[in-house]
């Protein structure tokens, strides 16, 4: 078995473009669920708003890339308002059901054949990412080497003997932008939650009635949290769409949202760095399990009668689901969390 | 070969690469007859939009064919019906399809059968998740394609007859939702848990019946009994092993709700692991000859499963009203602490509710699978409709859940008169949101503060 390859893959993915999508979406969710206690089960739809807002503006409407980003953010804000106005006055579990239903509506509308000439139906869309990669400062044919860091025709290789990191020039550009977004959002949220505004949010999570009796407009605070989380979700959608250079409706399923929750709870809800740590760990573990199982099957350490290549995916997700259940039962605060902070209850 | 469903799953997580998709352009497909036998040696011709032939290929031993293309565009794919073996036909009578090829290998679907679809009626008289399931994760393009191609035929059929058929299939579908919804609503009523894994109890029923029927080779009616018993046992075990200890620990309801999502993932991926991502069918009642009553076309299996479901729902309702335990259950749902103080063993009632809920969900799963086959994510897609039904009827009330389920079932089916079938679930989910807006306590729910 090639352990070097397994660890290289797992570590490369632990800070790579895919992890950034989950980190960003979970940061948004952290504002909504972690700090305010809103059960938004439709974060995938906010990501879809970002991704489709960008793709439709650039491809279908033919507008510049910057407009696409703007439309994506606006779509997420509109979605948050539409969802929030009817449901934020209701109990937490009602919000959960409505957001999950809304996310499913968005996905089904996006894959519908009715307007497939614009959205591409279930095939999705592509051809909107070129302006983004044209801005990339990383050259496709840069070749140099400096100590353990080398660049081979635009492919960055950081060789640390036991393992190495490898990224293509496109990955590097997505990661630069993605990590910059993560840094900006963490900074903004870090400042916000330590402001009086953030203390009201936590107050709403702990006891809505108490906050209301202090004369705060709970509904407005919840709405602001929903909108901010949704905007960050849309940013996750941008990174998702751009890193893959396409959007596909079925990737924005309810499972997508559930994995954001796994990431958030793994890292620790209501902790600033929880989502980032959770996303890194989630993708590290996912790649570690699936790559080592694949290697073991290829090296015939595991006979194919016990486990075939196609069963690796379900098995790894089964283990991740099991991990999530056990985590919630025995350590609901995650890695960074504070147990006393998260005694949520709806009744 | 990576199963298609798994591919979709990995795509959802962004694991699969996209680089190769940018280079390969083409059309492909797999030819199968109604019993899923692979058909080899059938000639398929691909021509461009002007009708200039590009290539003719024959399907291989494994039924697959592939034509690589140079550029995206519109192509005409023709299946030469004269090369089809022994009486097979293209079921929807469309051996020639015009397909839009974007920048990937596109799947083109030719449904083969020994007989033509009688004006495509079975598609609609079969319960909805059929077309639904087809469009989900198994080769997304193929499903959408099939729907696109069949649609115009549906438009042509007589309005009134179609409406009546849809009404009946809506009632049938509603009964199936009701079986699942009653359990979900009662669990919510007695414990306050919004159980996101209830849909996967439905899948569980379908899968157990598959095991009994296909693997052990027993008839379907035994499989139904086996699945219901297994569902009851599974519900009992879940409460005994997981939920009851959690309640004793004082775990918060939101934590429990998220745990139920984890449980749903566990059941779903275990099913995918052991059974794969393909849609499996039982050995009996697959292609049943429908009864054509002139004003209504309905298959016998729908009549029987519908009647059994209605009987079971009535029995549960009667038990709730007339038996001691039923009264105790309603008391717990109303006010658990008050019920406990009058001497009702709340934990015993909750255990019973889980057992019955599991059994009913499993029954719903088998009956749905008799029509549409079993797939690992069937319950997940049903779950949102079950939620809609429960919310519409009033969370926590068994009778409300039943009424809500019937309304949702009929609404979903009848809405295809107006909207395209692929959007019928959207309507049901929109109803859910509208109900939340205007009457969050549902039809039978008590007016209380839920904000």
Image (cartoon, grey):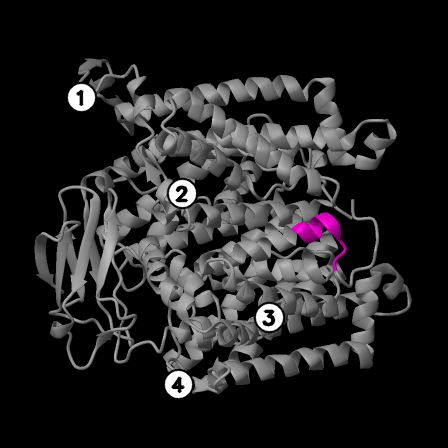
Secondary structure beneath label 1: loop
**Residue B398 sits inside the magenta stretch:** no
Chain ID for label 2?
A: B
Q: Name the residue under label 2.
A: B13
Q: In this view, does A143 lie to the left or right of A179?
A: left
Q: Can residue B364 be seen in this view?
A: yes
Q: Where is residue B9 in the image (x, y as percent from the top left)?
A: 39, 50
Q: Name the residue under label 3.
A: B174
**Front in this rendered view, residue A296 or A119:** A119
Q: Name the residue under label 4.
A: B289
For the residues labelled 4 and 1, say whether their Cβ atoms are less than 8 Å apart. no
The Cα–Cα distance between marks 4 and 3, rounded to whole angstroms, is 23 Å
Q: Dividing the picture into quarters, in which one does residue A288 lie? A: top left
| Above or below: residue A93 compared with residue B384 | above
Q: Name the residue under label 1.
A: A153
For the residues labelled 4 and 2, say whether their Cβ atoms are less than 8 Å apart. no
The Cα–Cα distance between marks 1 and 3, rounded to whole angstroms, is 60 Å
Secondary structure beneath label 2: loop
**Residue B436 sits inside the magenta stretch:** yes
**Which is nearer the N-term, disc 4 or disc 2?**
2
**The magenta segment:** B434-442
């Amino acid at each position: 078995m090639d352990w070097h390859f397994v660890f290289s893959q797992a570590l490369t993915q632990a800070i790579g473009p895919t992890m950034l999508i989950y980190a960003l979406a979970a940061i948004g969710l952290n504002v909504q669920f972690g700090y305010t206690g809103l059960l938004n089960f439709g974060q995938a739809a906010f990501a879809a708003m970002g991704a489709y807002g960008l793709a439709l503006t650039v491809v279908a409407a033919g507008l510049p890339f910057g407009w696409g980003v703007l439309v994506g953010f606006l779509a997420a804000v509109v979605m948050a308002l539409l969802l929030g106005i009817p449901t934020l006055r209701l109990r937490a579990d009602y919000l959960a059901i409505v957001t999950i239903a809304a996310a499913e509506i968005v996905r089904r509308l996006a894959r519908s054949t009715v307007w497939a000439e614009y959205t591409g139906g279930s095939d999705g869309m592509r051809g909107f990412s070129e302006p983004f990669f044209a801005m990339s400062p990383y050259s496709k044919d840069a070749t140099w080497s400096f100590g353990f860091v080398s660049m081979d025709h635009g492919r960055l290789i950081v060789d640390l003997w036991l393992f190495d990191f490898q990224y293509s020039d496109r990955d590097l550009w997505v990661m630069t932008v993605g990590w910059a977004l993560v840094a900006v959002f963490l900074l903004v949220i870090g400042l916000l939650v330590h402001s009086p505004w953030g203390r009201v949010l936590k107050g709403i999570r702990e006891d809505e009635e108490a906050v209301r009796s202090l004369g705060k407009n709970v509904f407005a605070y919840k709405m602001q949290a929903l909108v901010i989380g949704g905007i960050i979700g849309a940013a996750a959608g941008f990174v998702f769409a751009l890193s893959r250079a396409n959007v596909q409706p079925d990737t924005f399923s309810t499972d997508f949202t559930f994995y954001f929750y796994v990431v958030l709870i793994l890292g620790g809800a209501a902790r600033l760095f929880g989502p980032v740590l959770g996303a890194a760990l989630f993708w590290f573990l996912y790649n570690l399990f699936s790559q080592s199982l694949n290697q073991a099957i290829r090296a015939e350490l595991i006979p194919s009668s016990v486990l075939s290549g196609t069963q690796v995916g379900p098995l790894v997700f089964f283990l991740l689901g099991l991990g999530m259940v056990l985590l919630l039962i025995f350590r609901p605060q995650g890695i960074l969390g504070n147990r006393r902070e998260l005694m949520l209850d709806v009744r | 070969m990576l199963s298609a469903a798994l591919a979709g799953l990995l795509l959802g997580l962004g694991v699969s690469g996209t680089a190769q998709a940018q280079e390969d352009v083409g059309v492909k497909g797999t030819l199968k007859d109604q019993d899923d036998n692979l058909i080899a040696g059938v000639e398929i011709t691909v021509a461009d939009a002007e009708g200039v032939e590009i290539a003719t290929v024959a399907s291989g031993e494994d039924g697959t064919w592939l034509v690589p293309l140079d550029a995206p565009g519109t192509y005409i794919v023709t299946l030469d019906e004269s090369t089809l073996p022994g009486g097979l036909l293209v079921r929807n009578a469309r051996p020639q399809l015009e397909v839009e090829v974007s920048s990937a290998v596109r799947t083109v679907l030719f449904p083969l059968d020994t007989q033509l679809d009688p004006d495509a009626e079975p598609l609609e008289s079969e319960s909805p998740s059929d077309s639904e399931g087809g469009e989900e994760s198994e080769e997304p393009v193929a499903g959408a394609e099939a729907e696109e191609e069949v649609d115009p035929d549906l438009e042509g059929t007589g309005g009134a007859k179609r409406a009546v058929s849809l009404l009946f299939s809506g009632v049938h579908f509603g009964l199936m939702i009701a079986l699942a919804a009653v359990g979900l609503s009662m669990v919510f009523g007695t414990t306050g848990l919004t159980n996101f894994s209830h849909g996967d109890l439905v899948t569980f029923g379908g899968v157990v019946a598959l095991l009994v029927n296909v693997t052990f080779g027993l008839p379907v009616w035994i499989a139904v009994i086996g699945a219901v018993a297994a569902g009851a046992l599974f519900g009992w075990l879940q409460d005994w092993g997981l939920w009851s200890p959690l309640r004793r620990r004082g775990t918060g309801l939101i934590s429990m709700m998220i745990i139920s999502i984890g449980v749903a993932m566990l059941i779903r991926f275990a099913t995918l692991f052991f059974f794969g991502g393909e849609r499996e069918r039982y050995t009996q009642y697959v292609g049943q000859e429908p009864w054509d009553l002139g004003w209504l076309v309905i298959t016998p299996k729908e009549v029987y499963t519908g009647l059994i479901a209605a009987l079971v729902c009535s029995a549960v309702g009667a038990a709730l009203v007339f038996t001691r335990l039923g009264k105790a259950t309603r008391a717990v749902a109303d006010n658990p602490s008050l019920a406990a103080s009058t001497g009702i063993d709340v934990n015993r009632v909750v255990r019973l509710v889980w057992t019955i809920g599991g059994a009913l969900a499993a029954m719903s799963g088998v009956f749905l699978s008799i029509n549409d086959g079993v797939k690992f994510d069937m319950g997940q897609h049903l779950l949102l409709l079950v939620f809609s039904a429960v919310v519409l009827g009033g969370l926590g009330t068994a009778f409300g859940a039943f009424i809500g389920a019937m309304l949702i079932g009929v609404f979903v089916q009848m809405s295809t008169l107006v909207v395209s079938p692929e959007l019928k679930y959207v309507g049901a989910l929109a109803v859910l949101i509208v109900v939340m807006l205007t009457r969050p306590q549902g039809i039978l729910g008590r007016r209380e503060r839920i904000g």
